[in-house]
Image (cartoon, rainbow, N blue to C red):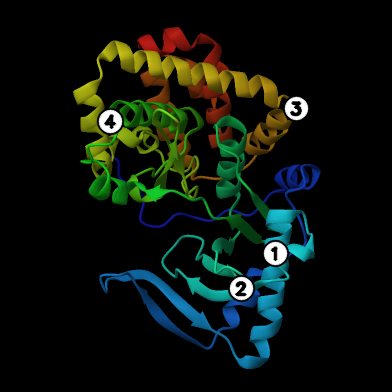
């Protein structure tokens, strides 16, 4: 089973990554995370069953609340409407929650349309370079688009909607209407996406299932929602969702419904799709990987450990020459053109 370190180190944004964020309009003056720390009271957030969610709703002095809420609404307009403030005319900040136990100590903002009570969320976090690489690699290499922005050492992320992976197991997995083959197929492809770009900690609480009804069938897509463990840990299995005990129901489903040949086929499909996205991304991905290869986003001993495991797994000593996590990701991506040979290992 995969095991994650108890506490991950946060890494600052280096000049090359900062330049990349500026060039591709990810760095937008918006808000300072520290401003949200000026709360003077809090209460725990409980779920419908009265269980502590590990989030707490925070409250601000009356003199602070108005300016903070106005700034948060402007952030939402930048995130969703390219700064058009007309979209926030009928919005109000309903709640600000803090998760003090998360690596980035995120604030979750609930924003509501007063005309129809429709609501949305977004997050304000301490910026961490490895998380930003994770967000950007997800945006470029996966079938999903990611909306986020950075302001100095503050990270703003949109909410990724979907059914949490652990809730999907208890609520949907035994449903007669569930297309189990499609879920099994998507888990295989999700496992491959994570391993190729070295995204770790993808247990069922850190991904959601996006359910899309079609005229004849229902489509499922597994989406990562937590990118703290992008290229950090030193063990190969951390980057493969199949090795997390929380994901056993998905693994058992795949084992029940798929042959090794069909698993190989879906792995091949996913690698081909990623290879296509690499070609389309062109200069953008090149600049991102250049920054990542020259950055320190993990401990040296983790890099050494992981490069040995990847070299053994792929039977390729090119990994042994890598000095950073970025170089390991880059080497993994360069091998996509030889994906048939790789998967046969």
Mark 2 vs mark 1, foreground winner is 2
Asked whether the residues under the numbered discs 4 and 3 touch, taking CB atoms below 8 Å apart as contact, a structural biologist would say no
Q: Secondary structure at mark 4?
A: helix
Q: Secondary structure at mark 3?
A: helix
Marks 4/1: CA–CA distance: 40 Å
The residue at which mark 4 appears reads as 180
Q: Identify the mark at residue 283; answer none if there is no mark.
A: 3
Q: Secondary structure at mark 1?
A: helix
Query: Residue 14, can we see it?
Result: yes
Marks 1/3: CA–CA distance: 29 Å
Q: Residue furthest bottom?
A: 62
Tell me residue 131's x, y (percent): 55, 49
Q: Identify the mark at residue 114; answer none if there is no mark.
A: 2
Tell me residue 297's x, y (percent): 55, 45
Q: Secondary structure at mark 2?
A: loop
Query: Residue 314, can we see it?
Result: no
Give the crowd class for mark 2: few <14, some 14-19, many >=20 residues within 10 Å: few
Q: Can you say whether 254 is above or below 41 in the image?
A: above
Q: Observer-nearest residue: 119 or 102?
A: 119
Marks 2/3: CA–CA distance: 43 Å
The residue at which mark 1 appears reads as 75
In percent of the image, x 73 and y 49: which residue is there? Answer: 26
Mark 4 vs mark 2, foreground winner is 2
Give the crowd class for mark 3: few <14, some 14-19, many >=20 residues within 10 Å: few
Comes first in the chain, label 4 or label 2: 2
């Amino acid at each position: 089973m995969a095991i994650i370190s108890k506490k991950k180190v946060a890494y600052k944004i280096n000049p090359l990554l900062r330049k990349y964020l500026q060039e591709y309009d990810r760095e937008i003056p918006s808000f300072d995370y520290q401003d949200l720390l000026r709360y003077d009271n809090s209460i725990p957030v409980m779920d419908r069953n009265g269980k502590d969610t590990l989030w707490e709703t925070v409250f601000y002095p009356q003199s602070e609340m108005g300016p903070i809420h106005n700034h948060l609404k402007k952030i939402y307009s930048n995130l969703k409407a390219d700064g058009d403030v007309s979209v926030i005319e009928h919005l109000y900040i309903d709640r600000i929650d803090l998760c003090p136990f998360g690596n980035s100590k995120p604030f979750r903002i609930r924003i509501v349309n007063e005309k129809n009570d429709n609501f949305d969320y977004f997050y304000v976090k301490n910026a961490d370079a490895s998380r930003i690489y994770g967000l950007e690699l997800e945006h470029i290499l996966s079938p999903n688009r990611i909306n986020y922005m950075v302001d100095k050492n503050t990270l703003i992320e949109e909410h990724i909607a979907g059914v949490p992976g652990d809730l999907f197991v208890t609520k949907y997995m035994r449903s007669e209407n569930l297309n189990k083959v499609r879920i099994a197929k998507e888990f295989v492809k999700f496992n491959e996406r994570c391993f190729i770009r070295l995204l770790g900690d993808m247990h069922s609480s850190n991904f959601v299932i996006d359910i899309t009804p079609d005229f004849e069938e229902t489509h499922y897509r597994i989406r990562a929602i937590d990118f703290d463990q992008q290229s950090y840990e030193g063990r190969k299995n951390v980057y493969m969702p199949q090795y997390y005990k929380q994901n056993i129901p998905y693994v058992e489903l795949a084992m029940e419904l798929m042959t090794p040949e069909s698993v190989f086929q879906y792995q091949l499909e996913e690698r081909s799709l990623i290879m296509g996205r690499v070609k389309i991304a062109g200069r953008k991905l090149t600049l991102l990987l250049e920054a990542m290869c020259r950055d320190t986003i993990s401990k040296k001993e983790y890099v050494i450990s992981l490069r040995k495991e990847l070299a053994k797994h792929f039977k390729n000593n090119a990994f042994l020459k890598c000095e950073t996590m970025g170089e390991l990701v880059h080497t993994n991506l360069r091998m996509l053109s030889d994906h048939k040979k790789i998967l046969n290992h």
